Image (cartoon, rainbow, N blue to C red):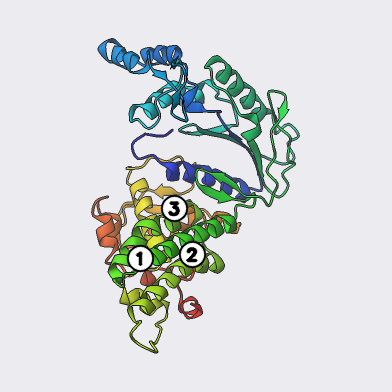
Amino acid sequence: MVFRKNHSVITQLLETFNDYTLAIENKKCVDVIFFDLAKAFDTVPHDRLLKKLYHLGITGALLNWIEDYLLNRTFTVLVESKNSNEYHITSGVPQGSILGPILFISYIFDIIDICKTDNVTPKLFADDLKAYTCFDFLNKNHYSPLQTFIQTFTKYCEINGLKIAVSKCSSFHIGTKNPFHQYTLQNINIPIIPPNEPIRDLGIYFTSNLKWDSHIKITTNKATRIYYTLIRSLKTNNTQFLITLFKIYVLPILEFGSPIINPYLNKDINSLENVQHKFLKIIYLRSMKHNNSPILPNYKELLELFKLESLSHRRLKSNLILFHNIISGKINLKHDNTYSILPTTTRGNPHNLFIPFCSSTIRKNSFFIDIPNIYRKLPTELQKSSIELFPKLLNNINLNNILSKSNSILLSPDLIQNF
């Protein structure tokens, strides 16, 4: 769900990809159906919405206020300075408002419970719904639970006045031995995403082998376009001003979804770092334009000069902070006991973590395996610190001294020279 405290796109995707990578580790397959509700926010019937709010315990003056807010609204269409006739709005929640999304979630809050199906995991974020099932490829009846969920969800939509855009739904199949079953919705085949074609889920692009090539390519291209636009549009030589703009407009693009992607291949790490490196080279040369032959520092020197961290270093710290929030109970995530906290009789380490051995590279480098392995190497005082204090103390830690293998997390000397 969305609009819940300490829940976000990232927390939902962490749960989802934990299930995906665990299935790969166990030599299983995953079938995923991505649903699309046609004009979801515009089709919510007002009368049904008010009834659901009443059953949720919203009554009296508040319910009357919401009723006045929704009903007796009209609209006209303006075409070339001419207005159409006035029409009453009988459905939909006002978009662009604060209350609109809350009303929509209140309307569909019961989807998960009503459509509950054994061996199927549904994930809902606003109007984005997906459902998946993990199965052994030898199971000839593996498709039955997910097909049952599809039928149940279809009935739910019919009862609640919601429409499914079947042509925009898709089925996604994970696993080398996945039989690629053809699922149907309203007697229409749901389009199957080809194995090498990426799908976009809540802003993250990935292929059926759970690789991030597509996402990183799309992300780096977008980030590069934005910083080139900034460089061309602004003639200033003020490097701090340009770096501030880079942090505001470019870094969020490069770092979105980092806990899920958690790059571990050198080519992926380099691709992301190269965006920041090229930007720093440009602003350095611009600031030195009066020098006929400036000596261009390498990437590490540029980072030191402009008091910046490598993207790899920023990702690691961000992931450690997120995991600390999870293990401290601030963020409640379902991770199927991927790691476990063993009892301890000492007053030392507060989190005696046990992380199971993983044979698959994808699973080994996933968030709930990779980050706990690093977290347990942190000093005891740091692990025992409060949620508020942890980020500050982490800044004082030399992570290179903690990690036995740094090239998958921080830039190694070899990588720096390649820049």
**Res 39 seen here:** yes
Number of residues whose C-alpha sits closer than 10 Å to that of mark 2, classed few (under 14), some (14–19) or many (20 or more): many
**Residue 308 screen position, x and y as percent:** 33, 69
Return the residue at label 2: 272
**Residue 329 screen position, x and y as percent:** 33, 42
* Measured Cα–Cα span from mark 2 to mark 3: 12 Å
Q: Residue at x 57, y 32 (%)?
A: 36
Q: Quadrant of residue 146?
A: top right
In the rendered structure, the answer to whether residue 62 lies left or right of residue 250 reads left
Q: What element does badge 3 sit on? A: loop
Q: Residue at x 50, y 61 (%)?
A: 220
Return the residue at label 1: 234
Please tell me which of labels 2 and 1 falls first in the chain.
Answer: 1
Q: Residue at x 45, y 39 (%)?
A: 334
User: Could you tell me the amino acid type at mark 2?
Assistant: Leu
User: Could you tell me the amino acid type at mark 3?
Assistant: Phe
Question: Residue 4, which numbered label?
Answer: none
The label nearer to you, 2 versus 1, is 1
Return the residue at label 3: 256
Q: Residue at x 34, y 87 (%)?
A: 291
Q: What element does badge 1 sit on? A: loop
